[in-house]
Amino acid sequence: MHAKVKSSETEKNIEGKTICHFINGEYTGSANGKTFNTYNPVTGKVYAQVHEAGRDEVDAAVRAAKNAMNGVWGEMTVEKRLELLYKLADGINDRFDDFLEAECLDTGKPYSLASHVDIPRGAANFKVFADVIKNVPTESFMLETPDGKGALNYALRVPKGVIAVISPWNLPLLLMTWKVGPALACGNTVVVKPSEETPATTALLGEVMNEAGIPAGVFNVVHGFGPDSAGEYLTQHPEVDAITFTGETATGTAIMQQAAIGMRDVSFELGGKNAGLVFADCDMDKAIEGTMRSVFANCGQVCLGTERVYVERPIFEEFVNRLKDEAEKLKPGLPKEEDTSFGPMVSLQQRDKVLSYYQKAKEDGANIITGGGIPEMPEEYKNGFWIEPTIWTGLPETSAVIREEIFGPCCHIQPFDTEEEAINMANDTQYGLATAIWTENASRAHRVAAKINVGIAWVNSWFLRDLRTPFGGSKQSGIGREGGVHSLEFYTEMRNVCLKL
Ligand code: NAD
């Protein structure tokens, strides 16, 4: 029933004309022939057609996942399963350049960034969780009984079943494998719906799954959009046992409503409006270097990024001037060029959204310290989704620019006078994902980190990730924690066995 695409057409599956679903170990198109365009953000041109899954393809993918769960994958020993995950990680590294090219084609991000973060982390996610699974014990209790013989209780950790993975476009491979890695390590099977903006590396991973010998049906991919498309069909599917999602808080709300039908468990990594706190006792060089990355890395399209910077008044002016100088050194350019330090936004729609905040900042009376528009680019790339790194001061804390997640390369810098005032401003948001605190005073560092309502508080660093630690958001920034043993809470179920002696 599916239009099978010959393997020669999918061989490179990244620069070809078509990106297909990956269902039950095979690349396949949509039965209804529906496709959509995917763009290269550097040129603004369409670079491939992507098949859009209808209910039939989603159903086929979920059934394939269910069959693998009830068959070869469910019966496989843990040792064999983990061996395959190691092969998978090696397989991604063996095809590093293919993944790098695909990721940068979809996102426009510099090779220098993707080759250090996206691809190696994308591969490492399989090894990390294979290691976790090997080393986590379960609990046991002896219960005393009236007959004096007792009962032994012990817990078994069992997979949940078919996991729907819905992923965003900002770190496509990394954030997708951050879910698929633990899901498979725990013995589940998955159906992934990557972002419609960035389908390439998820599709390519299918080839590596086959090369590594992962059984058909364990990893499936369906492409498409959210509402009335693959995303919604997948989260509505009654045979999906749990849903893990990274994306906007509003989308999380819609998915949670679908998950309520059939009582499916959810794991959510959602939006943020993260504050950076810079104290007068900071090491200014470190604070500038870290804030530069936290505001502008990946063109500001990082959920953990800083969009609100609070700086203690005595160093406010110096900080603003130095951040401006550094921001103006960022060099937009082609992903492959070594001196490119700044890529485009992922899509025209996303750029328009960010530009609307640039406009709003002007209307609300911001001082534009730098940026605020679209940069001049050479003729060949002028239709790419470029935008200027932007810094503002002088806005009231009530401005939408300070209250809403923008997800672009911009920040507002506000002075503060006391530690308490800084903490209050940092916490005055519906979000609670991350913060970065810059101070050389260790007591202050511990005190402030404990008081900011977030999932991750960095001190004198940003995006420094130990993958064994809990990762997730407080308030409207998420539900649950991922990372290390914490991922097991969602990807497994504990079954207690009580044996009367
Ligand atoms: P998004 O919510 O628009 O889309 C994410 C995914 O959900 C896409 O695959 C999309 O097709 C799908 N989707 C949309 N509507 C759906 C529906 N009704 N049912 C099922 N699926 C649906 O998010 P985005 O624009 O791709 O990503 C940016 C957002 O992600 C930002 O808010 C950012 O903060 C957040 N994010 C959070 C983290 C984190 O770890 N907390 C990490 C990265 C990104």
Image (cartoon, grey):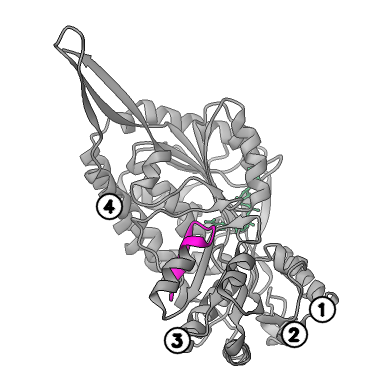
- Please state which amino acid type lies under the numbered disc 3: Asp
Q: Is residue 427 above or below residue 68?
A: below
Label 3 to label 2: alpha-carbon separation? 26 Å
Identified at 66% across, 74% down, the residue is: 43
Label 4 to label 1: alpha-carbon separation? 52 Å
Identified at 78% across, 75% down, the residue is: 361
Residue occupying the far right of the picture: 363
The circle drawn on residue 87 is 4
| Lower position in the chain sequence, tag 3 or tag 4 | 4
Percent across and percent down for residue 140 are 22, 29
- Please state which amino acid type lies under the numbered disc 4: Lys
Q: Is residue 355 above or below residue 172?
A: below
Callout 1 touching callout 2 (CB < 8 Å): yes
| Lower position in the chain sequence, tag 2 or tag 4 | 4
In the image, taking residue 157 as reference, residue 375 lies left or right, namely right
The circle drawn on residue 362 is 1
SS assignment at label 4: helix
Q: For the residue with label 3, is its CB less than 8 Å from the closest atom of ligand 1?
A: no
Identified at 56% across, 66% down, the residue is: 302
The circle drawn on residue 368 is 2
Residue 193 in view here:
no
| Lower position in the chain sequence, tag 4 or tag 1 | 4
Residue 88 in view here:
yes
Q: For the residue with label 4, is its CB less than 8 Å from the closest atom of ligand 1?
A: no
Instruction: State the quadrant of the C terminus.
Output: top left
| Lower position in the chain sequence, tag 1 or tag 2 | 1
Label 3: how many Cα within 10 Å (few below 14, some 14–19, many 20+): some
